[in-house]
């Protein structure tokens, strides 16, 4: 049964995604899965190739996946309008929530793998571990039907194999795999294409040309840097010097012989390169010949500098690829001259665009394909099933400009517990004030000396009658003259209408009368 959904009322933008249950025990599902997997393998081959070759793509994708890996999965109550309520940790729903992890890395492994698959092939297949130890999302490249020759020859009920280690070229070994029975193959989760809904909409497909150009540019720069002709240059030896008397290592150290000049020089250079730790490698090449030709020996070093246009093109291609992957380029290259507010805004924008929509996709799929399926098998009522969903908590992965200050402000407004405020500021619960310290702090803030000194031995030495009779204000024994100013009478600042010579139409209106 195919499930598609387009809605978001729980704190996110509108997103489109799809989840489809696949039963390999049914012949039509088996054939359909074979078609999907064959198609996905062909479409995603180049995308995985660029992911393995270009560090910018690998870092951009893995960075977003690792941020999403901070998500904590759970089962939550959901209203008919789609609003997420409180978390459910008990009963059957709590037990199902405890199984939402991958045997390869736990909850973080499950989330990171899914987010990576959504960024590269935009297609994934949900399976359950054979021993019931969690779930995992796999790519089409990892799946292989046993004895598959033609799509029409695949038999239902045979299950599939998951390739955990591909065959190594030149070693003649078969790939390592594990069996996935039909009951453990749950379904498919993908981002539908705007043109054909069963095709995955991979962002890498539109970036294939840019990836190829960037790779060729990197290879060209590498070739220029590694070129021995460009880095070592050319030694020019006049043709007139065709016989020399030299002392160069060839065979036995210190042997003298007559030879053509080029052969002798090359032999000595090769010896030095192959034996860098030998003392003889440091001996210069001794040559004799006509003096008139001495100044004709030249060593030409070719231009090895990198062109500025190459570096500019590389930066432009890198930014284009990162933007195509919904990644903020500044988050990969560094903030540069951007202030911390701009950097924080970019991080939040990347979280909202590149991470949260895919997390919502995953939660929707786990709700439809795991949570509700398990509850239906347990004969739970439809009303109870529809009122629950799998959701995530990404508070550990969110970045704020000043969490400690936000926590202090909320604590002052009695909207946050003191323990949470301490945690946001980086302090542990053991740093909380004791009961007596809390009373003293209240006394200090209230200006109460008795509470401020509560529990102190010196408190018994105080004369509390004097402290209590202390008055505030000016000292009555002060020799200063009394103030001559007196409180105003009537309406202070208001002109006396009876003595004013200003016409009434020009007088200001008296407020309140």
Image (spheres, rainbow, N blue to C red):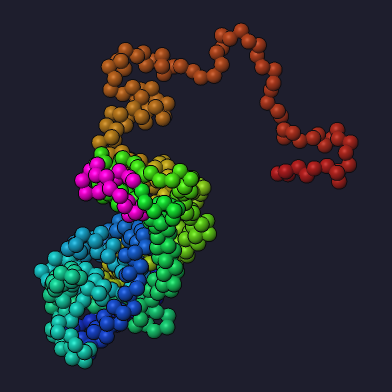
Which residue sits at x=19%, y=62%?
A: 104
- Image position of 80 with respect to 238: above or below: below
Q: Is residue 262 magenta?
A: yes
In the image, 490: left or right of 368? right
Q: Nearer the viewer, residue 392 or 285?
A: 285
- Image position of 425 with respect to 24: above or below: above
- Image position of 171 with respect to 245: above or below: below
Which residue sits at x=25%, y=74%?
A: 141
- Residue 290 at what x, y percent from top left? 43, 46
- Residue 170 at what x, y percent from top left? 18, 70
Q: Looking at this rendering, what residue extends furthest in the bottom direction?
A: 152
- When asked about the image quadrant of residue 202, the answer is bottom left
Q: Nearer the viewer, residue 506 or 68?
A: 68
Which residue sits at x=34%, y=64%?
A: 53
In the image, 2: left or right of 128? right
Q: Is residue 201 magenta?
A: no
- Residue 183 at what x, y percent from top left? 14, 78
- When asked about the image quadrant of residue 155, the answer is bottom left
Q: Which residues are magenta?
A: 245-264
């Amino acid at each position: 049964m195919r499930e598609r959904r387009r809605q978001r009322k729980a704190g996110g933008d509108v997103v489109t995604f799809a989840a489809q249950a696949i039963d390999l025990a049914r012949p039509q599902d088996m054939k359909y899965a074979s078609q999907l997997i064959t198609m996905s393998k062909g479409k995603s081959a180049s995308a995985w190739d660029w992911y393995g070759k270009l560090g910018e793509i690998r870092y951009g994708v893995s960075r977003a996946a690792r941020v999403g890996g901070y998500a904590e999965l759970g089962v939550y109550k959901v209203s008919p309008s789609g609003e997420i309520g409180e978390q459910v940790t008990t009963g059957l729903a709590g037990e199902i929530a405890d199984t939402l992890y991958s045997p390869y890395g736990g909850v973080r492994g499950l989330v990171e793998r899914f987010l990576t698959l959504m960024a590269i092939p935009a297609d994934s297949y949900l399976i359950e571990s054979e021993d019931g130890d969690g779930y995992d999302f796999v790519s089409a490249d990892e799946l292989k039907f046993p004895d598959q020759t033609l799509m029409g020859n695949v038999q239902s009920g045979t299950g599939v194999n998951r390739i955990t280690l591909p065959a190594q070229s030149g070693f003649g070994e078969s790939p390592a795999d594990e069996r996935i029975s039909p009951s453990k193959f749950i379904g498919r989760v993908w981002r539908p294409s705007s043109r054909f809904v069963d095709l995955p909409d991979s962002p890498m497909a539109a970036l294939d040309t840019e990836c190829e150009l960037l790779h060729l540019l990197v290879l060209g720069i590498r070739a220029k840097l590694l070129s021995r002709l460009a880095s070592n240059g050319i030694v020019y030896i006049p043709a007139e010097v065709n016989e020399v008397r030299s002392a160069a290592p060839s065979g036995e150290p210190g042997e003298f012989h007559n030879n053509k000049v080029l052969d002798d020089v090359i032999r000595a250079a090769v010896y030095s390169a192959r034996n860098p730790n030998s003392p003889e490698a440091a001996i210069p090449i001794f040559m004799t010949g006509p003096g008139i030709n001495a100044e004709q020996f030249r060593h030409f070093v070719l231009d090895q500098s990198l062109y500025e246009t190459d570096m500019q093109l590389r930066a432009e291609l890198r930014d284009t690829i990162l933007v195509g992957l919904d990644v903020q380029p500044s988050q990969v290259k560094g903030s540069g001259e951007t202030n911390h507010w701009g950097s924080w805004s970019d991080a939040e924008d990347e979280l909202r665009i590149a991470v949260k929509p895919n997390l919502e996709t995953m939660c929707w799929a786990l709700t439809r394909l795991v949570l509700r399926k398990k509850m239906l098998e347990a004969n739970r009522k439809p009303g109870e099933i529809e009122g629950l969903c799998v959701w995530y908590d990404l508070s550990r992965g969110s970045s704020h400009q000043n969490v400690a200050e936000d926590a202090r402000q909320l604590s002052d407004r009695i909207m946050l517990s003191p323990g949470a405020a301490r945690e946001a500021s980086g302090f542990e619960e053991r740093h909380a004030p004791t009961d007596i310290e809390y009373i003293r702090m209240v006394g200090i803030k209230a200006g109460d000396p008795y509470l401020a000194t509560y529990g102190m031995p010196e408190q018994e030495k105080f004369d509390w009658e004097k402290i209590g009779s202390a008055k505030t204000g000016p000292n009555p024994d002060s020799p200063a003259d009394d103030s001559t100013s007196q409180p105003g009478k009537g309406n202070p600042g208001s002109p006396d209408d009876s003595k004013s010579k200003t016409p009434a139409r020009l007088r200001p209106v008296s407020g309140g009368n």
